[in-house]
Every structure is written in structure tokens, then in C-alpha cells.
Image (cartoon, grey):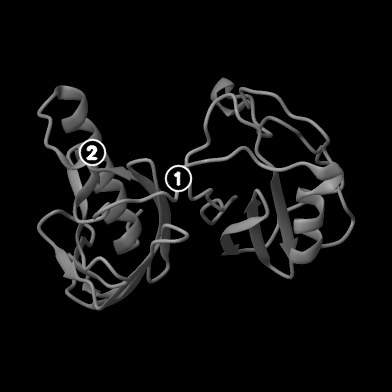
Amino acid sequence: MMGARDPMCRRRVRPGTWCHVVAVQDDGVNRLFVDAVLHDAVEHRLWTHESQPMHIGRNGTAERCFYFHGAIDDVRVYDRAVSEDEVRGLFGDGGWTAPTSNQLAVEGDPLSGRWGRDGVVFLDLLYDGGSRVMGQIMAGRPSNMARIASGTFDRDTARLRLEGIARDPRTSDPVVWLIEGMLDDGEIAVAATFNDFSGNFMLTGRGADVRMTRKSIRSQLGALAFRLRRWSGAR
């Protein structure tokens, strides 16, 4: 979406497996359902124009990377917002059921440790084995870590929720943050909100390991510079 992050699927989409996906725009809230489960919701207006075509399986721009690689079937477009009950009904239409997945069969301690991307640690977590999660998160730069004030993990759904207050790395002003995600097969898909900034990230345990390659260094510096510019409001 223009001006906001896209709603994010909180689990890995496995190649060769069908998924039931529903996107609902209702009164400024954009919701994404995958296999009848609400994965994300983003508040933002829907920009439309009477002369703008509707694309299925591609973005409205000419970039080759914005094409969907896979099969799409049984597309339906409604002139109103469907309810969650209707989404569940559509999911089971014709007796269809989603393929069995072991994504929620988490054993032992699947969460404690460092999670990151391109050698940058985003989350440093300690799970108590029940529902409580402690630790710290990266707030803008690796040297600016923030304590998790409240953290929960639901073993049945593999959903993670972390929140607290960080310090702006430039001004030291307090920043309210929220991170929500889902653990699936060694990956955590998270949506992070820091005041007015929000973004989607895919984190792994291996991604927190520092790999001093030319590509990883460029990736780290570019990503951190972008986040700092967005956070500080610089242009």
C-alpha cells in the first residue's frame, strides 16, 4: 500500500501447497486472512481511481519482480466487506480443508535466543516455557536495545506479542513500540510499530549470526540507514 506497510502473512507459505487468502477493506482497516485465520490488520485508506484497472497476480507497475509466481484459482470480488464468519464459510466452501501442517507442533523451548536478519540482532528473547517472554529488542540501531516490558507467546497458535518503550537513537525521546508475529518452522514473521513507523520483517536464528561478507555489510548499513531516516523524519 502507498503510505503504509502491507498486511503480512505471519507464517511461511510453502511451495506446492494451496492457501485460502482473503483481503478485506472496511472503513479504513485492511485485514488479511490466510486459511480463515486473521493474520494482520493495517489502518490506512484505500487509494482508488475510476480509471485504474484491477490487477490479479501482479502489481500495478511494470517491475518484473512484482508478478505472482504460482497458481491462482476461484477468485471472487465483492462489492462489500465480508465478515469473519463469511470468511470461515468461504474457507470451507465445497468441503475443502487446508493441508495438515506441523507449524504449531513446537517442542521444548522454540523461542529463546537471538533472532535477526543479515547478521543484525532484532530480538533477544527468553521464554519461560509457559506464556511469558522476556528480553530485549533492537530499537533503530544495534547499540540501542530496549527492554521488553510485556511479552507473551501462545504455544497453541505460535503467536508472539512484545511491547514496551524504547529511546529514539537520535533524540533519546521515548518511543512506544509493539511487535507482533508468528513462529513457523524456525522463522518469525513480525510486524513492528515504533510510534508512526511500521514495517514487516522475517527473522531467523541463523539471521542473527554475523556474516562479514560484502553483501551482508551493504545490507546491514543500508537497512539501518533507511530505518534511521524514517524514524527521525529525515528526507
Can you see residue 177?
yes
Please name the amino acid that badge 1 sits on.
Gln
**Mark 1 residue element:** loop
Q: Residue at x 71, y 50 (%)?
A: 22
The Cα atoms of the two marked residues, 2 and 1, are separated by 20 Å
Residue 192 percent location from the top left of the image: 38, 60
Q: Residue at x 78, y 65 (%)?
A: 85
Query: What label does residue 207 carry, if any?
Result: 2
Q: Left of 42 or right of it: where is 209?
A: left
Q: Nearer the viewer, residue 165 or 73?
A: 73
Q: Which mark is first along the chain, 1 or 2?
A: 1
Which image quarter: residue 87? bottom right
**Mark 2 residue element:** helix
Can you see residue 83?
no
Residue 25 percent location from the top left of the image: 73, 60
Which image quarter: residue 79? bottom right
Query: Which residue ends up furthest to the right in the rendered image?
Result: 79
Q: To which residue does mark 1 refer?
A: 103
Q: Nearer the viewer, residue 162 or 92?
A: 92
Labelled pair 2, 1 in contact (Cβ < 8 Å)? no
Q: Nearer the viewer, residue 123 or 62?
A: 123
Which image quarter: residue 119? top left
Q: Residue at x 38, y 41 (%)?
A: 185
Q: Left of 115 or right of it: where is 97?
A: right
Q: Left of 69 or right of it: where is 230?
A: left
Residue 61 percent location from the top left of the image: 64, 30
Residue 78 percent location from the top left of the image: 88, 52
Q: Nearer the viewer, residue 199 or 108?
A: 108
Q: Residue at x 75, y 57 (%)?
A: 88
Choose mark 2 or mark 1, whichever is in front: 1
Please name the amino acid that badge 2 sits on.
Gly
Q: Left of 224 or right of it: where is 153?
A: right
